[in-house]
Image: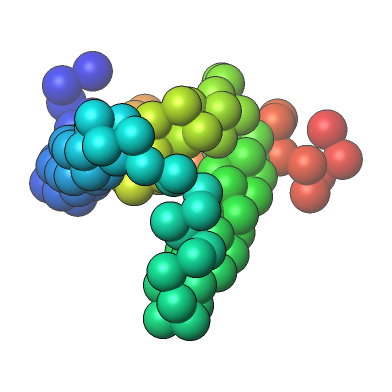
Amino acid sequence: MIKNVTPLAVVYLVLSLLGLVGTWTFNAFAIVQARDFIGDWVGSGPAVSSLTVDLLVVAVAGSVLTIVEARRLGMRFGWLYVVLAGLTAFAFTFPLFLAAREMTLQSARLSGRNPTVDEGNPDTGS
């Protein structure tokens, strides 16, 4: 497995950890202060609402990409990254998925397989 860890996978793993620590630090503050989490998202003015919509759309698009790309590459449990995003943070699970994707691609490159053609690819009718 360690031979599949590329520098790009390491970058994604570091970003994933930063996303987990960064988001959960502020989640902990919100819990300790008994804040209305959803209300704070949408009730703090148009700039915060704009950022909320921006990030939600990116999260939905990234979730679709995660499921489709995991299936295309034959990665098992791609849906789990999306579920975990709801329990942790998308800033954690999306870079984690990208790291796993990079390692899957590296494994395919090292074994001489074409990483974009897999029996799990929905575009091939499989």
- Is 121 situated left or right of 91 in this image? right
Q: Indicate the position of residue 35 as horizontal and vertical percent values.
A: 37, 42
Residue 8 visible to an observer of this rendering: yes
Outermost residue on the front side: it is: 34
Name the residue rendered at 48%, 81% in the picture. 46
Q: Indicate the position of residue 118 as horizontal and vertical percent values.
A: 63, 35
- Is 57 situated left or right of 48 in this image? right
- In front of the other: 72 or 92: 92
Name the residue rendered at 70%, 30% in the picture. 119
Residue 116 visible to an observer of this rendering: no
- In front of the other: 82 or 23: 23
Quadrant showing the N terminus: top left
Q: Indicate the position of residue 91 as horizontal and vertical percent values.
A: 34, 47
- Is 115 situated left or right of 64 in this image? left
Q: Relative to 36, is 84 above or below? A: above
Q: Indicate the position of residue 98 as horizontal and vertical percent values.
A: 37, 44
Q: Which color scheme does this rendered protein use?
A: rainbow
Name the residue rendered at 50%, 72% in the picture. 49
Outermost residue on the bottom side: it is: 46
- Is 2 situated left or right of 75 in this image? left
Give the mark count. 0
Quadrant showing the C terminus: top right
